[in-house]
Amino acid sequence: RGMAVPAGASLLVMPWLVHRHETLWEQPGHFRPERFLPDRRERIDRFAFLPFGAGPRVCIGASFAMQEGVIALAALLRHLRFDFAGVRAPRPVQKITVQPEGGLPMRVSRR
Ligand code: HEM
């Protein structure tokens, strides 16, 4: 805020940092999915949460990806239970997309 940007400068937007910035989020380091409940979602600034980017080059698959994710999860969780089976908490690593280092071992059982 209030910073001069020289003409011709390149700006990089880091969603990882934006999504954890203390001026934008309450308890930025906490996992609180209820932030996104329908009655609270409206209060989130359009540029504070950008998993699909923003502006003219925004992801064209965003709606599809959200629907597909919910449908796939619902189909799996209806019949199966997933329990974390790793030895230590997963660590995020940057590999074009952010991924859990060494994968996310799960124990799968029938519900
Ligand atoms: C969870 C899944 C996905 C995530 C997190 C994601 C994220 C992104 C991001 C961050 C961008 C760059 C936006 C920007 O430059 O500001 C992008 C672009 C794009 N995405 Fe996705 N995406 C996802 C799924 C999909 C799917 C399912 C499709 C196609 C069916 C898709 C098609 C595209 C295309 C074509 C672009 C380039 C748009 C352009 O440059 O004009 N994405 N996506």
Image (spheres, helix red, strand yellow):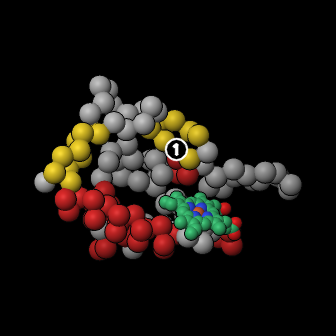
**x and y, in percent, of residue 98 in the image:** 52, 44
Q: Name the residue under label 1.
A: 98
Q: Could you say where residue 63 lies in the image, as x and y percent from the top left?
A: 48, 73
Count of residue discs: 1
Q: Is residue 104 left or right of residue 84?
A: right
Image quarter of the C terminus: bottom left
Q: Quadrant of the N terminus?
A: bottom right
Answer yes or no: is residue 31 visible. yes
Q: Where is residue 34 in the image (x, y as percent from the top left)?
A: 28, 60
Helix, strand or loop at mark 1? strand
Question: Badge 1, how many Cα within 10 Å: few under 14, some, many 20+?
Answer: few
The residue closer to the viewer here, 109 or 82, is 109
Report the residue at 37% width, 38% height from top: 104
The foreground one among 36 and 60 is 60
- Residue, far right: 8
Placement of 19 over or under 101, stated as above or below: below
Residue at coordinates 48% horizontally, 41% vertically from top-left? 99
The answer to which quarter of the image holds residue 95 is: top right
Above or below, comparing residue 4 to residue 58 in the picture: above
Q: Which residue corresponds to the image point at 23% horizontal and 44% vertical from the top-left?
A: 108
Residue at image coords 30%, 53%: 32
Q: Is residue 54 visible?
A: no
State which image quarter holds ligand 1.
bottom right
Image position of 78 with respect to 85: above or below: below
Residue ranking furthest to the top: 87
Q: Does the residue labelled 1 lie within 8 Å of ligand 1?
A: no
Q: Nearer the viewer, residue 19 or 82?
A: 82
What amino acid type is highlighted by mark number 1? Answer: Val
In percent of width and height, residue 44 lies at 43, 66
Residue found at the very far left of the displayed protein: 111
Q: In this view, does 49 lie to the left or right of 35?
A: right
Residue nearest the observer in this picture, 23 or 71? 71
